[in-house]
């Protein structure tokens, strides 16, 4: 990446393999060459302007990494950061667990899978498919949203915690009926996990919470969710 006459180069390489195990558990393995980080090289002289090699993981594999206004925003392990591309200094760091009290975003609980049970003649077969990462950070242009094990939090571009929302997260299919989903102009969030909830994206205010809604959730339009349970179908407006 070129930035103000300099080339931003990634150093180090990590290869991550994720396997879906019996019982629906995700098991990961990594291998690679350290250190991980970035080096800025002057385009005219070829000299190194600065280097940042204190990354825990390969930054190209990190979630939520993006460049905005000469600043690299990203997530290294459990830490959000804003790195200046001018001199390689950190404008701020924010630990998701310690500073945001959001809990972990890694490990087996970060993943959810689809479970299907097939009944045959004298046999019962269980299959696991569609692995997806639920616990994660996302950069939303003006802020981060982090889905942690204990809380959903918003961290603004200045590294300050804007709001936190406690939720009863579980990756089990019987509890996680609707993955966290963004909708609307305010970047609101809805999910169904031990209750059906809607959050205001700017303030974190709970717009609604219904602990009794259950069934198969389907988003049929930007502002409409349909929930099917046995022979009954209900529609829920997201406006």
Image: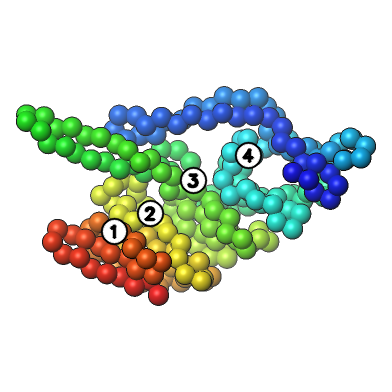
Front one among 32 and 218:
218
Above-or-below relation of 215 to 17: below
- Quarter holding the C terminus? bottom left
Q: Identify the residue at image location x=80%, y=48%.
A: 3
Callout 3: SS: loop
Q: CA distance from mark 1 to mark 2?
A: 9 Å
Q: Quadrant of residue 237?
A: bottom left
Which of the two labelled residues, at mark 3 and mark 1, occupies the earlier sequence position?
3
Q: CA distance from mark 4 to mark 2?
A: 25 Å
Residue, disc 1? 217
Q: From the viewer's perspective, is 233 left or right of 56?
A: left
Q: CA distance from mark 2 to mark 3?
A: 15 Å
- Disc 2 vs disc 3: which is toward the camera? 2
Above-or-below relation of 41 to 158: above
Q: Decide: marks 4, 2 in contact (CB < 8 A)? A: no
- Disc 3 vs disc 4: which is toward the camera? 4
Residue, disc 2? 179
Q: From the viewer's perspective, is 141 left or right of 83?
A: left
Residue, disc 3? 105
Which of the two labelled residues, at mark 2 and mark 3, occupies the earlier sequence position?
3
Callout 1: SS: strand
Instruction: Provide residue 149's location: percent of width, then percent of height.
Output: 44, 49
Callout 4: SS: loop
Q: CA distance from mark 1 to mark 4?
A: 33 Å
Callout 2: SS: strand
Residue, disc 4? 60
Instruction: Provide residue 63's location: percent of width, then percent of height.
Output: 56, 45
Above-or-below relation of 175 to 25: below
């Amino acid at each position: 990446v070129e930035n103000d006459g300099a080339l931003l180069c990634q150093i180090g390489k990590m290869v991550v393999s994720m396997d879906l195990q019996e019982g629906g558990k995700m098991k990961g393995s990594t291998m690679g060459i350290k250190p991980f980080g970035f080096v800025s090289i002057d385009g005219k002289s070829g000299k190194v302007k600065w280097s940042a090699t204190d990354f825990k993981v390969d930054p190209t594999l990190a979630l939520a990494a993006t460049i905005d206004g000469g600043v690299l925003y990203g997530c290294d392990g459990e830490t959000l950061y804003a790195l200046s591309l001018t001199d390689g200094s950190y404008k701020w760091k924010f630990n998701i667990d310690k500073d945001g009290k959001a809990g972990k975003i890694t490990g087996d609980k970060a993943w959810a899978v689809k479970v299907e049970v097939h009944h045959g003649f004298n046999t019962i077969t269980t299959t696991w498919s569609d692995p997806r990462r639920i616990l994660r950070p996302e950069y939303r242009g003006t802020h981060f949203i982090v889905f942690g094990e204990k809380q959903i939090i918003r961290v603004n571009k200045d590294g300050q915690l804007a709001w936190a929302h406690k939720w009863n997260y579980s990756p089990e299919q019987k509890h996680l009926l609707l993955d966290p989903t963004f909708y609307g102009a305010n970047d609101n969030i809805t999910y169904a996990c031990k209750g059906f909830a809607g959050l205001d994206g700017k303030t974190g205010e709970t717009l609604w919470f219904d602990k009794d809604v259950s069934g198969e959730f389907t988003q049929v339009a930007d502002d409409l969710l349909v929930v099917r349970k046995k022979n009954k179908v209900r529609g829920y407006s997201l406006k």
